[in-house]
Amino acid sequence: MAQDAFENLISGCPLLETLKLIEIEGFSQINIDSPSLKFLKIFGDVEVISFVNSFQLATVVVDLGSYLNSEGNQGRLHGSSSNLLKFFDLTYKA
């Protein structure tokens, strides 16, 4: 599924309160635009998660195992700074 179609599916569900994404691959960034979303669980290989209009979001569960164990991130984790702080991009637009 193309990233745009995936993001449109999420934003097109105005009553969506729980979203579980298991074994996500092929997305470097996921943009979550869901005003009613309260619970998000992500297991997969995602570099950045961006939240837009997600003011109800109360619980986020992210498996960072694949992120922390990937060869590309090992150098960043042992260097002077980590890219982990950029993992969540909290952007709220009214």
Image (cartoon, rainbow, N blue to C red):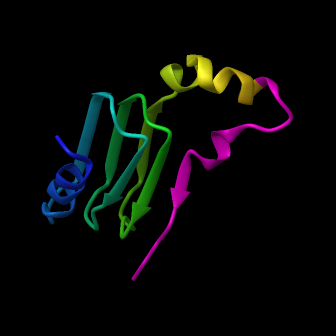
The location of residue 27, given as percent across then percent down, is 36, 39
Q: Position of residue 28 (x, y in %)?
A: 43, 41
Number of numbered callouts drawn: 0
Q: Quadrant of the C terminus?
A: bottom left
**Horizontal placement of 38 versus 79: left or right?**
left
Q: Is residue 61 left or right of residue 20?
A: right
Q: Quadrant of the N terminus?
A: top left
Residue 18 in the magenta stretch? The answer is no
Q: Decide: is 15 above or below 49.
A: below
Above/below status of 11 relative to 42: below
Identify which residue, 5 or 16, lies in the foreground. Answer: 5
Q: Residue 74: give x, y in percent of width and height.
A: 68, 21
Could you say which quadrant of the image residue 9 lies in?
bottom left
Query: Is 92 colored magenta in this rendering?
Result: yes
Residue 82, quarter of picture: top right
Relative vertical location of residue 82 with respect to residue 91 in this rendering, above or below? above
Q: Residue furthest right?
A: 80
Q: Residue at x 33, y 33 (%)?
A: 26
Residue for point 43% across, 44% down: 60
Residue positioned 80% across, 38% down in the render: 81
List x then y, in percent, for residue 77.
Answer: 73, 27
Q: Nearer the viewer, residue 43 or 78?
A: 78
Q: Which residues are magenta?
A: 78-94
